[in-house]
Amino acid sequence: MASTTRHGLTSALRGVPKTLYTRQTQSLQQQFQSLRLSESAAVTNGCRCLTTEAIKAAPEVDLEALKTRKVHEVRHARAIPASPGYFSRVAKFNDTYIALEKLLAQYGNLPTIPATEVERVQWRTYSDFATGVGEKIRLIDYKRCLAIVKRLNQIHPKLKPAVVKTALESFKREIQAYKNVPKPIPIDKFGRALGVGKRKSSSARAFLVEGNGEVLVNGKTLAEYFGRVHDRESAIWALHATGRADKYNVWARVDGGGTTGQAEALTLAISKALMAHEPALKPALRRAGCVTRDPRRVERKKHGHLKARKSPTWVKR
Amino acid sequence: MSAPNCLRCLGRRPSTATTVTAAGRCAPFSTTAVNGNVPMRAKTPNPMAKEIGFRSGARLTIKKKKVNHNEGKAPAPGERKAYRKKIVLSNDNALPVPWLKNMNAEHLASPQSAGKVLSLPSELQDQLRASEAFQPSQNWGFFRKPSTLVRTETVDLVTRMQDSASEKKTLRLVVTGSKLVGKSTMLLQAMAHAYLNGWIVIHIPDAQELVNASTEYGRIPETEPTQYMQPAYALKLLQAIKKANEKVLAKINTVSSHPELPQNIPVNTPLLTLVNAAKEAEGAWPVFHALWSELTNPNANRPPVLFSLDGLSHIMKMSEYRSPSFELIHAHDLAFVRLFNDVLSGNLKFPNGGAVLASTSRSNAPRSPSMEISLAQRKAEQAGAAPEELPKKEPYFKGYDDRVEAVLKSVEVMEVKGLTKPEARSIMEYWAASGMLRAAVDERTVSEKWTLAGNGVLGELERASLLTMKYF
């Protein structure tokens, strides 16, 4: 029977089990659906589940061998794709999605840790993933996919199987910003912490030790070094804002820039050194504006202008 | 210009007024000149523009601003300087501080009063004001009464003064320290102690005035090398001495007659009379010389003398005066400076003891490398450094002055430093009690201001907490 009909011939060539072709009058769609259904999986899990493993792609047709065996040359034979998802619009994505779902079904019962305690990962963005795969994925699908990824990532790290780990790797960004952790500032044997700060074109290094509030900047006292009271205040702002002005001594080196820049570079340097002594002060220091470096620099001069934006005086002629 | 309708006419029937309104078409009651309201005539086109034949439209005309040259009256000569030098010692709006005590003769020398704020009694205020001990840059005018913080350094200095007076020695001391640290106030406190204890005080408030060629000068005959007197300054100084030391000078008498003076000053005349003999600048220098010789006479029983000077570096260099051969005169050739240096170097001693104090300045001070190196060496010596460890002069620098180094060869140096935190707290409590510092004075505020003030520099403490509106 198989050799007389067209179906039978192609299926014989591809090595498809005959059981699938018992009903002659199936439409193409029905045939495809039945192809993808794995009966065994559906039975075991109690739900419909897609698999690609039940069907094996046929080996390449060796025409020479066929000639020698005096088999009729078959025309219009089509190769069956490796993945049944081939006929969908987003084959690769579907495959990964299915694989992930399978993993979730398999390992979803493993104990998890709370989401807040999971190591922070930067997942690939939608556009990044879509260009990587080269398919037009729908955003909603990618989001669903990521939900599974995040759920799998929550599995307790000691129990997480290697399969899951490798599966998650493809969803991670190549550069993980969260791995870029600043080196903790050590406190040396003399009890000093060295903080470095910058502002405009000034840079400051401040050594902070426990003391009684004395400050030396480039070998001078604060009042000698900064003529302006405002600058002195901003130099020790980190200590003042946290109420530590009389608890530490500062020895600092500052260079570059002007007085304001130097004073504000010192703010940052002292606050970093202070965070080395008392890490719990970080939120207070952030509220005081002593944690983030101010990235602003002098704006460049433009041609046709006197300065960055100042125009020359308007003359009628 | 008179108004077109006088006030008397306003009461009458408005015959004139109606005519005016008809002509000028202005409001029925108006004092504005009618001429100002003449309706504009149509513009006649500019004949020149037509001739040339281009752009005769609206033109940009820039009017010159009227400059009013006579805005008020210019201040009279010397008025500006008087305003600049004005010293205000009290402020009625400040709260009186209940715990404040008046200073007495013993207070400044007793260690118990260290770290306390004491006010100056009114008589002492007058004396200090006469000798120009108060400076316009100090903020006396903030408070109800002028008061000072007695520091451990003050007690130390005053005790040394007292000891030298009781041993009939002369304390020779230079007060140094960083900017705004309270060097001049230290002199003021020394003077306050001297006045309260019946010393005679001669104070040169600003050494700059002696050397910057601002007062007249003349050669003193028969001196080798030639010395120069400054008669106008002598008169001013004598008057200050008289005003400040009146009581003491009235009590002590001359021991020698002074034939060089035009007035007849017999023996046993009160020194006050001698001082009063200087009425004009012309004879002031001989009178000062006579007074000086009386005060330093070894055979007389005199009270201790305090000779003080502010701004030492001015007299440790060439002055701006010129000799007859148009060469710069060294400051040490000026008679006043010479007298001061004689005592400071130890060549001349007050027979009944006393002190000579000089303070350096940081704000208005010319560089005097010899003075700087000498003071550094003296300081190192006092700290116990061996002779080979002393700071050395730069071998290739030519600006050193041997005469300066000779004067400062054996003086004592006292470096005034920042306040301690208890002292800072004491003065800040006084400020707060006077209503001038609007903050709770607790440990945190004190230590924060102390840090801002460069480890307790008193002037900076004022800037950081009292003068926040002026310096920010």
Image (cartoon, helix red, strand yellow):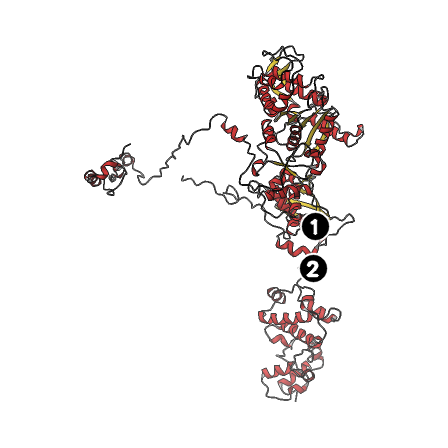
Q: Nearer the viewer, residue B206 or B288?
A: B288
Q: Residues within 10 Å of mark 1 (few under 14, many from 20)?
A: many
The residue located at (30%, 39%) in the rendering is: B56
The label number, if any, that marks residue A273 in the structure image: 1
Q: Disc 2 residue type? A: Lys
In the shown orientation, is residue B223 left or right of residue A159?
left
Q: Residue at x 77, y 30 (%)?
A: B382
Nearer to us of marks 2 and 1 is: 1
Disc 2, SS: helix
Q: Residues within 10 Å of mark 2 (few under 14, many from 20)?
A: few
What element does badge 1 sit on? Answer: helix
Quote the CA–CA distance across marks 2 and 1: 22 Å
Classify residue A222 as left or right of residue B25. right
Camera-nearest residue between A131 and B114? B114
- Across and down, in percent, residue B262 comes to 58, 11
Q: Which mark is residue B130?
A: none
Chain ID of residue with mark 1: A
Q: Identify the mark nearer the N-term, 2 or 1.
A: 2
| Above or below, B103 relative to B442 | above
Residue A35, percent across and down?
64, 82
Quarter of the image where the C terminus of chain B is located: top right
- Front position in the image: B208 or A307: B208
Q: Residue at x 67, y 34 (%)?
A: B178
Tell me which corner region of the image, top left, top right, bottom left or bottom right, holds residue A158.
bottom right
Considering only vertical position in the picture, is A188 above or below A74?
Answer: above
Residue B229: in sight, yes or no?
Answer: no
- Subunit of mark 2? A
As displayed, is residue B122 above or below residue B270? below
> Residue B408 location, x and y as percent?
72, 24
Q: Which mark is residue A179?
A: 2
Placement of the N terminus of chain B among the 4 image quadrants = top left
Position of residue B80 measured from the top left corner of the image (x, y, whole percent): 50, 29
